[in-house]
């Protein structure tokens, strides 16, 4: 266009160009401020213009922005310059915040490192404590095992001793059993002989009604049976018993029986008493009630109570044989012989 119509169009085009340039400069200024804040400017004294500072912070690709900021300052005047200065102050304040954050981060890192070291030290102490506890438990378990082994050894020794004693008792029992069998055979023979003698005596009584008194043994006193130990032999045995070995003592005790053991103990201790042993001279109970009560264990004619036995209360007799049922056969001075319970002897103790 030309003439009057071309002038308004030129002015409008020029106004648009100025507006575009201003928008571009404002965008460049905002971009420079954003780059300065993002780049973390250090706290330094301000220059009259931010262009050199912005160029140094952005390092690459910011020279034109800094120039634009400087030219924008010149174009817009002091008001625009003050705005740019305020933006720089904000950037420096952001830099101080970043430095504070870095300091806090460093402090947190150091605190974390210290906590890590403390945790490692605590773990080491815990491991050391657990190791010591394990060693103590192992030591206690070892001592307990040692004590248990010692106890087992003691139990084995006791069991071996019991086994030896039982073996000795078994041998002694077998010997006693054999002796008992011999006694049974002898008793059966004696019973047979006694029955024959009773038959002969009955026949003699029928022929001669007058009853003859039993003949007293020669010398007027009953004699001990053959094989019975004398008092001197008992005293000698009690002296030798102390020096015997354990098996010999055990065998001696089994041989002499309970009453023999009581007599040996009494001789060693200097005591006296009544002992139902072959060859011992004893006295029967004198009180009738006690004498009758001594037969309460038996009801048979051989070992039980009878008027003939009652007539012998309080008399002395010599033990001929003792039996396992706690009865004995005794011989009186007039030659009579009866079986009595141990309880019938005066001074008897079980």
Image: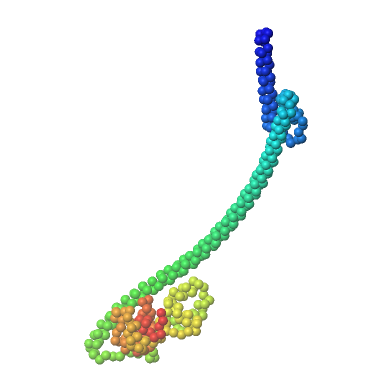
The colouring scheme, among rainbow, by chain, secondary structure or one colour, is rainbow
Farthest top residue in view:
2
The foreground one among 257 and 152 is: 152
* Residue at position x 62%, y 49% in the image: 123
Work out whether residue 132 or residue 188 is closer to the camera in this orientation and state it. Answer: 132
Q: Residue 173, how many percent across, how many down? A: 41, 71
The image position of residue 258, as x and y in percent, is: 42, 77
In the image: residue 75, left or right of residue 190:
right
Label count reads: 0
Measured along the vertical axis of the image, is residue 291 above or below residue 68?
Answer: below
Residue 213 image offset from top left, x and y in percent: 30, 90
Q: Residue at x 40, y 73 (%)?
A: 176
Between 232 and 116, the one nearer to me in the picture: 116
Q: Quadrant of residue 322?
A: bottom left
Q: Which quadrant would residue 304 be assigned to in this image? A: bottom left
The vertical placement of 47 against 314, above or below, is above
Please tell me which residue is depicted at 24% across the width and 85% down the height of the picture.
Answer: 203
Question: Split into 4 quadrants, where in the image is the C terminus?
Answer: bottom left
- Asked whether residue 222 is in view, the answer is no
Res. 155 visible in picture: yes
How far from the left and from the top, in percent, is residue 115? 65, 47
């Amino acid at each position: 266009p030309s003439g009057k119509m071309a002038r308004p169009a030129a002015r409008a085009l020029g106004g648009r160009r100025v507006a575009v340039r201003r928008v571009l400069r404002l965008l460049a200024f905002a971009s420079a401020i954003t780059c300065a804040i993002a780049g973390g400017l250090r706290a330094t004294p301000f220059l009259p213009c931010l262009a050199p500072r912005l160029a140094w912070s952005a390092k690459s690709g910011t020279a034109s922005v800094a120039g634009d900021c400087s030219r924008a300052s010149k174009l817009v005047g002091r008001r625009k310059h003050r705005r740019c200065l305020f933006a720089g102050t904000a950037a420096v304040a952001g830099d101080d915040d970043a430095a504070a954050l870095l300091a806090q981060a460093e402090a947190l890192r150091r605190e974390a490192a210290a906590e890590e070291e403390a945790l490692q030290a605590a773990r080491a102490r815990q491991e050391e404590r657990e190791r010591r506890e394990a060693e103590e438990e192992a030591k206690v378990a070892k001592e307990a095992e040692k004590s248990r082994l010692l106890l087992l050894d003691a139990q084995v020794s006791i069991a071996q001793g019991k086994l030896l004693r039982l073996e000795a008792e078994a041998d002694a029992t077998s010997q006693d059993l054999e002796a008992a069998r011999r006694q049974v055979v002898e008793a059966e023979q004696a019973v047979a002989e006694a029955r024959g003698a009773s038959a002969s005596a009955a026949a003699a009584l029928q022929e001669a009604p007058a009853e003859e008194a039993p003949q007293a043994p020669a010398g007027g006193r009953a004699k001990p049976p053959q094989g019975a130990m004398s008092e001197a032999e008992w005293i000698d045995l009690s002296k030798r018993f102390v020096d015997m070995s354990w098996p010999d003592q055990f065998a001696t005790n089994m041989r002499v029986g309970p009453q023999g053991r009581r007599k040996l103990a009494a001789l060693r201790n200097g005591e006296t008493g009544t002992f139902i042993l072959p060859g011992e001279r004893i006295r029967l109970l004198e009180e009738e009630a006690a004498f009758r009560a001594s037969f309460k264990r038996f009801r048979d004619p051989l070992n039980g109570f009878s008027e003939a036995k009652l007539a012998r209360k309080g008399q002395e007799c010599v033990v001929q044989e003792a039996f396992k049922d706690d009865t004995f056969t005794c011989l009186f001075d007039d030659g009579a012989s009866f079986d009595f319970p141990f309880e019938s002897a005066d001074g008897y103790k079980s």
